[in-house]
Amino acid sequence: MTLPTGTAASLDDQPADDRILRQGLRNIGDMIRLEPKPFAVGAVGAMANTAMTLFLSFVVGWVVSSIAVPAYESGEVVLGTVMIGVAALLGTSIIRFSTMCARRIGAGVMMFGVQAHWRRQITRRYLALPVSWHQKHPTGTLLSNANADVEAATRPLAPLPFAVGTLFMVVIAMGAFFWIDWAIALVALGMFPTLFALNALFATKMAPRAKRAQELRAEVSAVGHESFDGALVVKAMGREAAETERFSATAEELRDAMIGVGRLRAAFEPAISGLPEIGVLVALLVGLARFEAGAIDLGQLVTVSFMFSVLAFPVRAIGWVLGDLPGSVVGRRRVDHVLSATGDMTYGQAELPETTAPARLEFDAVAYAYPDGKEALHEVTFTVEAGTTVALVGATGSGKSTLAHLAARLIDPTRGTVTLDGSDLRDLTHASLARTTALVQQIPFVFDDTVRANLALDRPGLTDDRLWDALVAAGAEKFTAALEQGLDTEVGERGTTLSGGQRQRLTLARALAGRPRLLILDDATSAVDPKVESQILTGLKDSADVASVLVVAYRRATIALADEVVFLEDGRITARGPHQELLKTHQPYADLVTAYERAEAEREFEGEFDDPEFNDPDFKDEETAA
Ligand SMILES: Nc1ncnc2c1ncn2[C@@H]1O[C@H](COP(=O)(O)OP(=O)(O)OP(=O)(O)O)[C@@H](O)[C@H]1O
């Protein structure tokens, strides 16, 4: 049995500088394959645009030599010829404008299309990866993967069609230069390769800085997310200054890294943007000399000068693409780190029958080791017989939650088997497993949506009647009915408008609405009034839709409701049997349950339950009177 370790290519395995260009160009190739149509529109638009720009050079040259010069020499303006000149200039400009639109639209659609594709892939991957992978990756970093990294990876796409068009223009212009005059062509031949070499040098120097900046973006996102997520703890513990300091330190590191990026850019940018201007100047000087030597005429001189000056700006687009390559390679590697992460849960083909009868859960010699190698459970063997309730009891860290996660197949055992009605959980289809079992955790997760949406989670066939039945069974119908809009009430981000106890009962109702055949409660009612908790669990046992229940329990009353208690010590079952029997026969168990009882009495005395109904005498009387 292999563990879902969630490994992937290491991010430190950074490509050497000389490979940045190759990897960057391959990355661009991959992105073109993802969005070929918008790229084609953008590139064809750009090439048509540059062709029109070059054509304009000839039009300008022709207007000068055939209209302006004869008019100047004869002192006569021929209106018809002028109109042809104006029409040629206007027509070329209109086509240039429309092709520029096509270039920009193509580039935008391509870039946002690739971004959307990768974001979808990343989200799918996050959902497919096992819990063990998520435990090792902070949420802030995952957010950064889906945002900053995807954006960095696709950044060269914005100027890409422009750069492709420019390359096309350079090739045509070179031909034109050679056709007009070899000396002018030599100037161009010197300028363009120097410009490409300069850009390539810039890209390789930028690579390590871009990598560091991208890592720090993820760190800032992770620290920020943790601080905002833990805002209540930070405030309650008076840790604002320390937390601000922690965030500032990372933010300052990012600032320094970005300044480093800016410095390098500042060092190269003047040379990269100045070189074409120098080229124009040299071409003009050489052109003038060649004109005086009679090698070219005035129209050709104007054409050549115009061509050099219209090329001076677009050749920068090639620099923009090359300048964004290092960041894009680093962003792509970080995206690939998520997309290539292994450790998916693979599901089998077996289906359990679609009945509502309670299921039988069996652990046979189960062991589980976390990815750090620490074995949390050893040789665990026990059964939850169909329709019975088994309480898992054990000191903190004894392995109760690990066992609950194995029962719900959030993780797979390192050794041994977990079976439902005789089928190994690993052989079942995902749908069959989700239909049969439901896990309710101590920390309830509530979506920023209505009560109805939170209960139904888009599962088919969950009518309002069924949702109300589940709310009744979870002891949540009174507070739901008291909400202003009942099932349609928005509960806010993470259910902030509800108390902790209400959130727990809502998530219990969510699980019950699916009528699971095995219900796993991992301390799922800890914030609920103990008496209400007892009522809920008794109700579940007596209900017509009786399920088998595996419950991680701390309260004596809850434990006493179970048909059998499984007592865990350091990941091993050291005692099993009915609660009353274990109290008499197993001293560590008796000690723990007594300690729980004492702690519970203190909590109750101090009114600690995060459940307004419990702390509100009217509600409490109403709910506990039955
Ligand atoms: N993600 C993890 N990585 C490594 N070790 C872990 C991880 N989660 C839990 N453990 C370890 O596994 C052991 C069992 O943990 P588990 O959460 O199952 O205990 P528990 O009985 O549910 O504890 P509690 O009552 O405090 O919730 C503990 O020693 C814990 O430190």
Image (cartoon, grey):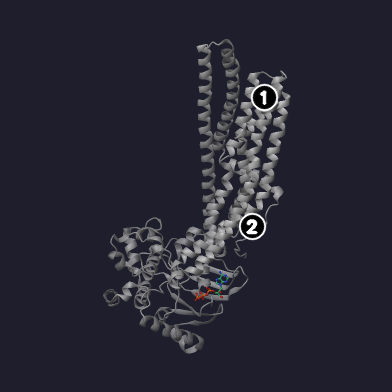
**Residue nearest the viewer, comparing 290 with 429:** 290
Residue 171 placement, left or right of 561: right
- Mark 1 and ligand 1: say if the CB distance to the nearest ligand atom is below 8 Å: no
- The earlier-in-sequence mark between 1 and 2 is 2
Q: Which residue is mark 2?
A: 11
Image quarter where the C terminus lies is bottom left
* Number of numbered discs on residues: 2
Residue 408 placement, left or right of 10: left
Q: Which residue is mark 1?
A: 176
Q: Residue at x 50, y 61 (%)?
A: 224
Estimate the x, y position of residue 210 in percent, counting from the top left: 62, 52
**Residue nearest the viewer, comparing 189 with 396:** 189
Mark 1 neighbour class, 10 Å CA radius: few under 14, some 14 to 19, many 20 or more: some
Position above or below: 57 against 340: above
Q: Residue at x 33, y 68 (%)?
A: 476
Estimate the x, y position of residue 93 in percent, counting from the top left: 52, 26
Quarter of the image where ligand 1 sits: bottom right
Position above or below: 35 against 214: above
Amino acid at circle 2? Leu
The secondary structure type at the circle numbered 2 is: loop
**Residue nearest the viewer, comparing 292 with 15:** 292
Estimate the x, y position of residue 472 in percent, counting from the top left: 32, 68
